């Protein structure tokens, strides 16, 4: 899971890898996301994650 930090112009100023999942899931501490956003002086954040199937670059149907 990644946190993208944006400025007022909605440009990505920094990104931070919050967690990396295993076979059955991942655990993300939201406090770490906010700490990263505050340190980068972000005005907005986006939390992003993906599900890969067979190490393919195409999303699986469940993600669509």
Image (spheres, rainbow, N blue to C red):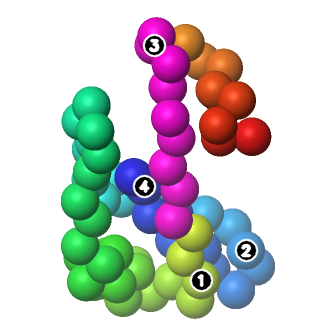
Which label was assigned to residue 10?
2
Nearer to me, 10 or 30: 30
- Which tag, 1 or 2, sits closer to the chain's start? 2
In the image: residue 14, left or right of residue 8: left
For label 4, the residue is 2
Nearer to me, 23 or 36: 23
The crowding category of the residue bearing disc 3, from other C-alpha atoms within 10 Å (few below 14, some 14 to 19, many at least 20), is: few
Tag 3 near tag 4, CB within 8 Å: no
The crowding category of the residue bearing disc 4, from other C-alpha atoms within 10 Å (few below 14, some 14 to 19, many at least 20), is: some
The magenta segment: 47-55
The crowding category of the residue bearing disc 2, from other C-alpha atoms within 10 Å (few below 14, some 14 to 19, many at least 20), is: few
Which residue sits at x=34%, y=84%? 34
In what element is the residue under mark 4?
strand
Q: Is residue 28 above or below residue 61?
A: below
Report the mark closest to the observer, 4 or 2.
4
In the image: residue 56, left or right of residue 59: left
In what element is the residue under mark 1?
strand
């Amino acid at each position: 899971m990644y946190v993208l930090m944006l400025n007022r112009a909605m440009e990505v100023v920094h990104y931070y890898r919050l967690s990396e999942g295993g076979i059955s899931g991942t655990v993300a501490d939201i406090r770490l996301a906010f700490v990263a956003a505050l340190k980068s002086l972000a005005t907005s954040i986006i939390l992003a994650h993906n599900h890969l199937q067979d190490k393919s670059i195409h999303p699986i149907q469940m993600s669509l």
